[in-house]
Image (cartoon, rainbow, N blue to C red):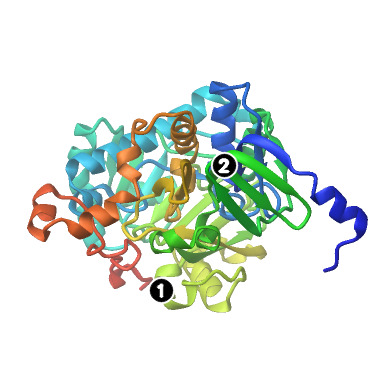
């Protein structure tokens, strides 16, 4: 595309900000919100390549879950009990902040609890065994036998599961837009950053139409981070998720969000009766390791098979919409936060591993604190990118004795049992 004289003249008028947030998703807009709350005198811009929430933040099911994408006992085994407990509390704080800080009616806040349901007997046993540990960690959970689970969500064949009373759902796109509006930041949408030039005082950013300068930058662009910071390409990879929406059902049959088969499938029903269902990636893993935004017949058929198998009454509901989105997955299933190598006063956050709504609002506060001068805000060590280089240099026996994670641990998606496939 060519640029006219008038457009070039406009682009060369550089605008200076105290903080430029690159990425208009849940994490970027939450960071701008908390910067506006804590330091309203700052001049802040949010720069987004598409529309606000145009990436994964506006393409997910809107689950506000606690914990990671795995079950609690898996987290204890992978990270150690102390880290697993801290991760759960971080996400619980995220949920509580959404409830207390924001006007929930603006983004469809509904906090009637959530179900984490087993897809096979092994997972069922693991979930049941995790209840005592979760309660010891302060989690409000109760185990439900298979019959109660199926009765509660009008299903057939689901295993037992954990009901978490603090589970919640939102309209994720409206949440992102609400945060952006409330932040007071300058919103620069449809402006993909094509170049960042760092100097000791900050950074210059170029988009097709603008040149901006920021004293500090927050890079919250998910799997696109390596295109802006090639030096951190090892901490995130792109993974696609797919979803569908049915025509509205006549009755409300699924009153709470359902997260099943080790997170391999998920479903919720909207107030108008529409069903949202997604997942199936674990059965098509190689094909979904991509940054291509398109649906595929194979994954879509897997989602429909799940829906029709466990919720037979949905077989008469036509599919009204299908979509996909790409997410950033980290090597060990935890988000990754760190200083920008070229400018340590700036920071990046990525690798939310399909669980951005569970972390995003609280993570925005952490990033705002980090930008404000706190080198180790509460929770920072849970997500610090330095854990990968530190673990690489630490003796293997020492790692195991502390229950810490490293590059040697399997990716959480890779570790999902094949027995969780639909039978």
Where the N terminus falls, by quadrant? Answer: bottom right
Q: Is residue 312 above or below residue 300?
A: above
- Residue 278: % across, % down: 51, 60
Q: Is residue 317 left or right of residue 371?
A: right
- Residue 47: % across, % down: 66, 46
Which residue lies under the disc numbered 2?
A: 202
Which residue lies under the disc numbered 1?
A: 283
| Nearer-the-camera pick, 161 or 24 | 24
Residue 363 seen by the camera: yes
In the figure, residue 363 lies in which quadrant? top left
Q: Is residue 92 above or below residue 59?
A: above
- Per the image, label 2 sits on a secondary structure element best described as strand
* Residue at horizontal 66 percent and vertical 28 percent from the top: 182
Where the C terminus falls, by quadrant? Answer: bottom left
Q: Is residue 116 left or right of residue 405?
A: right
Q: Is residue 90 above or below residue 392?
A: above
| CB within 8 Å, label 2 to label 1 | no
- Residue 38: % across, % down: 53, 22
| Nearer-the-camera pick, 337 or 416 | 337
Q: Nearer the viewer, mark 2 or mark 1?
A: 2
- Per the image, label 1 sits on a secondary structure element best described as helix
- Residue 361: % across, % down: 50, 36
Residue density around tag 2, few if under 14, some if 14–19, many if 20 or more, within 10 Å: many
* Residue at horizontal 37 percent and vertical 31 percent from the top: 377
Looking at the image, is mark 2 or mark 1 earlier in the sequence? Answer: 2
| In the image, farthest residue toward the front | 200
């Amino acid at each position: 595309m060519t640029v006219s004289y008038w457009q070039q003249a406009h682009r060369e008028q550089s605008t200076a900000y105290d903080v430029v947030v690159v990425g208009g998703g849940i994490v970027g807009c939450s960071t701008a919100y908390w910067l506006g709350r804590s330091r309203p005198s700052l001049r802040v811009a949010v720069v987004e390549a598409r529309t606000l929430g145009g990436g994964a933040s506006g393409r997910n099911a809107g689950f506000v879950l606690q914990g990671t994408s795995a079950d609690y006992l898996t987290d204890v085994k992978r990270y150690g009990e102390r880290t697993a407990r801290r991760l759960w509390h971080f996400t619980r704080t995220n949920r509580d902040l959404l409830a207390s800080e924001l006007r929930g009616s603006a983004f469809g806040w509904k906090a009637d609890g959530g179900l984490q349901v087993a897809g096979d007997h092994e997972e069922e046993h693991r979930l049941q065994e995790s209840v005592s540990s979760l309660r010891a960690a302060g989690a409000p959970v109760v185990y439900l036998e298979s019959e109660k689970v199926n009765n509660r969500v009008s299903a057939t064949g689901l295993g037992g599961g954990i009901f978490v009373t603090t589970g919640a759902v939102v309209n994720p796109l409206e949440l992102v837009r609400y945060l952006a509006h409330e932040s007071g930041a300058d919103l620069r949408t449809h402006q993909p950053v094509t170049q960042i030039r760092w100097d000791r005082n900050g950074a210059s950013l170029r988009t097709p139409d603008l040149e901006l300068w920021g004293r500090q930058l927050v890079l919250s662009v998910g799997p696109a981070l390596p295109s802006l910071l090639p030096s951190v390409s090892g901490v995130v990879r792109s993974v696609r998720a797919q979803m569908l929406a049915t025509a509205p059902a006549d009755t409300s049959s699924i009153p709470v969000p359902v997260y099943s088969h080790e997170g391999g499938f998920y479903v919720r029903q909207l107030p108008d009766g529409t069903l949202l269902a997604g997942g199936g990636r674990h059965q098509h893993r190689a094909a979904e390791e991509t940054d291509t935004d398109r649906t595929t017949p194979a994954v879509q058929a897997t989602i429909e098979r799940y829906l029709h198998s466990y919720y037979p009454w949905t077989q008469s509901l036509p599919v009204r919409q299908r979509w996909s989105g790409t997410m950033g997955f980290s090597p060990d299933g935890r988000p990754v936060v760190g200083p920008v190598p070229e400018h340590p006063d700036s920071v990046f956050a990525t690798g939310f591993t399909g669980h951005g709504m569970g972390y995003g609002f609280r993570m925005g506060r952490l990033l705002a604190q980090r930008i404000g001068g706190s080198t180790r805000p509460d929770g920072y060590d849970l997500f610090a990118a330095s854990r990968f280089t530190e673990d690489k240099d630490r003796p293997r026996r020492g790692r195991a004795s502390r229950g810490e994670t490293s590059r040697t641990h399997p990716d959480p998606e890779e570790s999902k049992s094949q027995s969780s496939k639909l039978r």
